[in-house]
Amino acid sequence: MAIARRIKDKIRAETGLTASVGVAPNKFLAKLASDLKKPDGLAVITEADKVEMLAPLPVSKMWGVGKVTEKRLHELGLRTIGDIQRIPVDELRELLGNSAEHLRALAFGEDDRDVETESETKSISSEHTFDDDTADLGQIRKCLLEQCEEVGVRLRREQLAARTVQLKLRYADFTTLTRRKTLATPTQDEMTLYEVAVRLLSAERIQNKRIRLIGVGGSNLVPPEAQTDLFDQTAQKRTRLARAVDDLRAKLGSKAIKRGSSLS
């Protein structure tokens, strides 16, 4: 509390602006607390009172629950965080699939994410410069797939999803261009990233053009919405596969398993 008051006082002294600050045992609850008494508030959520405090709040207050997910949860009769608290975990898993544990943990005020003191991640990308400029479309797509895998792993590790996919190309004459596509639903799935990147690549009609550098990235980053897993069976299977691959790479090394492209 003393640190929080000093932060508020310093902001006011140096900028003349008010600030709302939240104090809590973890990142999710601290952010929630900072929203409770705007525009010039100081709110505290303790370990002892977190469950009771969360219960009456709408599900939209949970980290990662956007408008689409909120609508789906309402359709299931889950309007408050307390509604999620009261459902047995097995029943919740039947309703919500892979996202049950994540949402239930938040409903009880549990969040094990580290507090990062560096600047917020704005984008996650991967670039590769070929040893020799190439017009080999198979080689270019293979490289693109590997880059999308890297970006997908980093998005999942940082618990982020990309609304925008970016493709970067540099030709042999050093002409450089970027192309972007904003998605209807944010993603952290490498195959979704790859499919979008390939479409962007195809639109450039690069046949017989020699490429020096290729890069792919995800930007416009947001928390991954539970809806992307809950109600799309294809997305659900991809998520399970991606997490299994992440676990294998963590145990056996980053090059222990590679995907094959399913796109021509």
Image (tube, grey):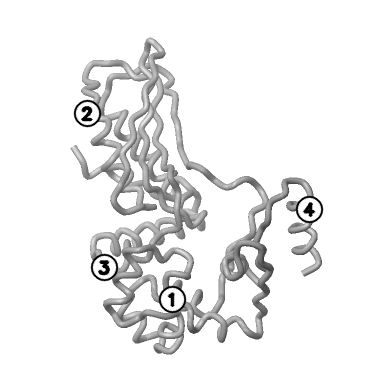
Neighbours of disc 2 within 10 Å: few (<14), some (14-19), many (20+): few
Tell me how far mark 4 sits from mark 2, CA to CA: 52 Å
Neighbours of disc 4 within 10 Å: few (<14), some (14-19), many (20+): some
Is residue 109 or residue 199 the one in the foreground?
Answer: 109
- 1 or 4: tag closer to the N-terminus: 4
Tell me how far mark 1 sits from mark 3, CA to CA: 21 Å
Residue at left offset 31%, top offset 29% = 140
SS assignment at label 3: loop
Image quarter of the C terminus? top left
Identified by mark 3, the residue type is Phe
- What residue did someone put label 2 on? 203
- What residue did someone put label 1 on? 58
Image quarter of the N terminus? bottom right
Rendered image: mark on residue 231? 3
Residue 64 in the image: above or below residue 79: above
- Residue farthest to the top, as pictured: 173
Residue 82 position in % (x across, y down): 45, 85
Residue at left offset 37%, top offset 13% = 172
Identified by mark 2, the residue type is Ala
